[in-house]
Image: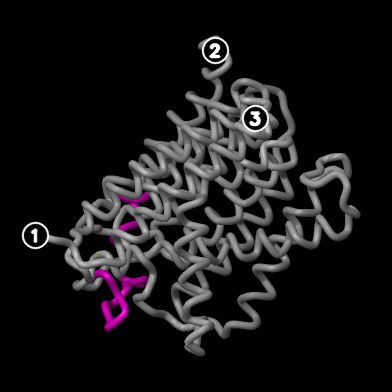
Amino acid sequence: MAASNLLPFLLAAALAAPLSACLTWALRPLLQHYALARPNARSSHRVPTPQGGGIAVIAATLVAAGAAAVAMHISVPVVIFAATLGIALLGAADDLKSMPVLPRLLLQAAAVGAVVSTLPPDARVFPAWPLGIERGLLFLAGLWFVNLVNFMDGLDLMTVAEVVPVTAAMVLVGSLGELPLQTTLVAAALCGAMVGFAPFNRPVATVFLGDVGSLPIGLLLGWALMQLASHQHLAAALLLPLYYLADASLTLARRIAKREPFWAAHRTHFYQRATDNGFTVPRVVGEVFVLNVGLAVLAIASAFAGSVTVNILMVLLGAGAVALLLFRFSRSRSF
């Protein structure tokens, strides 16, 4: 890999990281006054904590990615940026005053629909399927992904432990031409922005992302994963977010099976059960981070293997590693 291939993306990340950190620091007093998340029976935190740090993360991501795109003389993904800003505003409104489920879902659907509409007709995940059916499934997958990122953002540093390995892997894959430049720049900027936010969100967090952060992060990651899958790297697109996909989807299925109000706040995700079972917060997010690094390695290997057999093997290895961690989180820790 030529260092010059990575340089623009490293510069985008290097711009986003301090910008995110400075904005988070500057916004924290304002968030402390207007957007305080107070603990309740379903919370993982014990003291009132400002939320809305996602404003800094998303602003840094879009500014750094846009500046890098202009510097490289490539087009800025205007529709993606507009959809990201729109869903961030939705998240901000929900942070300040909880919105009803249906209007919130409809507005999320509009943002996801805009993102899916940007995919060119020849960008196919399953070329043998009718285009309309494939786009419909991508829309549903994108809508679920936006929400599952929001669901999983319930522990200090959890989203950082997910997003940084995923976006770093996308940058490596994109630097070798397996992702569009626009997508790779956004991934690099988001990676840097999350690194800049991390010191404020490490246990015990002094600021949370809030829906203003988790929803647009889910939208940007979902878009990047769609791009990866449409470049015939479906195995990599599944492997990178596999822990989040498994934890959120299995938890949702379990709650539906028990006829619980699955749309309501709860503490039954595997990572939440882990803290109830004696795992410390640093231990939980540390193990998730290590797992995600391993999944990123498997995803990168699958992207360049060029073999269906290798892809299947990588997915099976990743699924086994995720299943093992979920099993451990669901059992009481032995002291």
Front one among 221 and 80: 221
Q: Is residue 204 above or below residue 312?
A: below
Whether residue 41 is visible to the viewer of this picture, yes or no, is yes
The image quadrant that residue 122 belongs to is top right
Q: Element under label 2?
A: loop
Magenta stretch bounds: 24-45
Q: CA distance from mark 1 to mark 3?
A: 51 Å
Q: Element under label 1?
A: loop
**Location of residue 270 in the rendering, given as x and y in whole percent from the top left corner:** 36, 66
- Give the farthest residue toward the left: 335
Q: Element under label 3?
A: helix
Q: Is residue 25 magenta?
A: yes
Q: If the image is split into quadrants, where does the C terminus sit?
A: bottom left
Q: If the image is split into quadrants, where does the N terminus sit?
A: top right
Q: Are marks 3 and 2 in contact (CB under 8 Å)?
A: no
From the image, tell me which residue sits under label 3.
Answer: 69
Whether residue 31 is visible to the viewer of this picture, yes or no, is no
Q: Is residue 139 above or below residue 175?
A: below
From the image, tell me which residue sits under label 2.
Answer: 1
Could you classify mark 1 by the number of other residues whose Cα lies within 10 Å: few (under 14), some (14-19), or many (20 or more)? few
Q: Residue at x 43, y 50 (%)?
A: 56
Q: Residue at x 81, y 56 (%)?
A: 135
Q: Is residue 316 above or below residue 211?
A: above
Q: CA distance from mark 1 to mark 2?
A: 45 Å
**Location of residue 18 in the rendering, given as x and y in whole percent from the top left corner:** 37, 36
Disc on the earlier residue, 1 or 3: 3
**Location of residue 283 in the rendering, given as x and y in whole percent from the top left corner:** 22, 52
From the image, tell me which residue sits under label 1.
Answer: 335
Q: Is residue 232 above or below residue 267?
A: above
Q: Residue at x 77, y 45 (%)?
A: 125
The image quadrant that residue 206 belongs to is bottom left
Q: Nearer the viewer, mark 1 or mark 3?
A: 1
